[in-house]
């Protein structure tokens, strides 16, 4: 199945986790790829895997929170591949802390990467997606859809991604560009290594969030992204697809 033959896909956060799994999945379905991450070593590893699968790959180390770097990334990707059909925003960072001990610097950092970075990429790619009738898939989170302890900055950023996606779906849908999001939960990725309960945390608050299914790998989310980004989802716009095994909040 080559749903992405003759399609060019930009993926941020491609060095590991969901970003890498998505790049590998779309490479297996025929996509030409433009990959980005701040992790140069991981980005190269993903690129080599995708090239080995037969994909044409352009890769560039970029910080999505930097406006100039995003503009340069998108321009370089289009120059390399000649067009852009899909943008997948995965780049993100996580932070756990009691609200009362959450530093403004940490809040700003999370918002800058997760929300502002997604906005900057969406803005930069839109003029390239309109001529191709392309689409965007953003990465929100189940923490944006229900209360989650100790993730005030992360949840706020992902809630913003959800709202941003809904706005773009309405604003550009009739012009031919779809915009959807995924909300992962109970997914085993390197970002989970950042999970540390704050000092004095009430464990009962986290125990009430129980998955009906076991935790799964990032390829589970990559499958959902591949669906939303493909023509199989031609009549899907403004959807936030939960990929969480049935999380109870």
Image (cartoon, grey):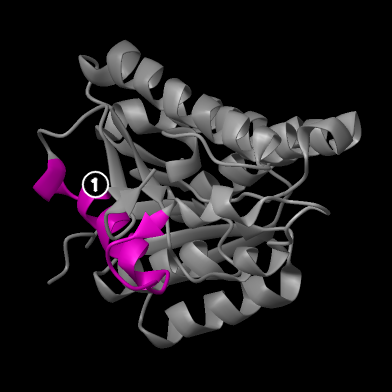
- Residue 135: give x, y in percent of width and height: 31, 37
Q: Is residue 5 above or below residue 72?
A: below
Q: Quadrant of the C terminus?
A: top left
* Left-right relation of 209 to 200: left
Q: Quadrant of the N terminus?
A: bottom left
Q: Is residue 124 magenta?
A: no
- Residue 119: give x, y in percent of width and height: 57, 27
Q: Is residue 211 magenta?
A: yes
- Residue 145: give x, y in percent of width and height: 41, 33
Q: Nearer the viewer, residue 224 or 172?
A: 224
Magenta-colored span = 210-233
- Residue 173: give x, y in percent of width and height: 24, 19
Q: Is residue 84 visible?
A: no
Q: Is residue 82 above or below residue 44?
A: above
Residue 187 figure quarter? bottom left
Residue tagged 1: 228
Q: Is residue 29 visible?
A: yes
Q: Nearer the viewer, residue 74 or 190?
A: 190
Residue 192 figure quarter? bottom right
Residue at (59%, 40%) from the top-left corner? Answer: 75
Classify mark 1: helix, strand or loop: helix
Local crowd size for mark 1, using a 10 Å CA cut-off: few (<14), some (14–19), many (≥20): many
């Amino acid at each position: 199945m080559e749903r992405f033959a003759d399609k060019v896909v930009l993926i941020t956060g491609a060095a590991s986790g969901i970003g890498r799994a998505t790049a590998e999945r779309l490479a297996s379905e025929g996509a030409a790829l433009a990959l980005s991450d701040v992790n140069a070593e991981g980005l190269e590893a993903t690129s080599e895997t995708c090239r080995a699968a037969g994909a044409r790959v352009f890769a560039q180390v970029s910080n999505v929170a930097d406006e100039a770097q995003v503009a340069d990334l998108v321009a370089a990707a289009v120059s390399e591949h000649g067009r852009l059909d899909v943008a997948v925003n995965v780049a993100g960072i996580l932070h756990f802390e009691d609200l009362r001990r959450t530093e403004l610097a940490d809040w700003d950092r999370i918002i800058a990467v997760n929300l502002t970075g997604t906005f900057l990429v969406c803005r930069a790619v839109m003029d390239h997606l309109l001529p191709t009738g392309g689409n965007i898939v953003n990465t929100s989170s189940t923490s944006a859809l229900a209360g989650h302890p100790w993730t005030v900055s992360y949840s706020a950023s992902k809630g913003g991604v959800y709202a941003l996606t809904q706005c773009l779906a309405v604003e550009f849908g009739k012009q031919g560009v779809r915009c959807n999001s995924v909300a992962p939960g109970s997914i085993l990725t390197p970002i989970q290594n950042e999970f540390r309960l704050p000092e004095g945390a009430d464990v009962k608050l986290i125990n009430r969030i129980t998955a009906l299914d076991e935790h799964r790998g990032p390829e589970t989310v990559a499958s959902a992204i591949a669906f939303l980004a493909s023509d199989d989802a031609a009549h899907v716009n403004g959807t936030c697809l939960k990929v969480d095994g049935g999380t109870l909040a």
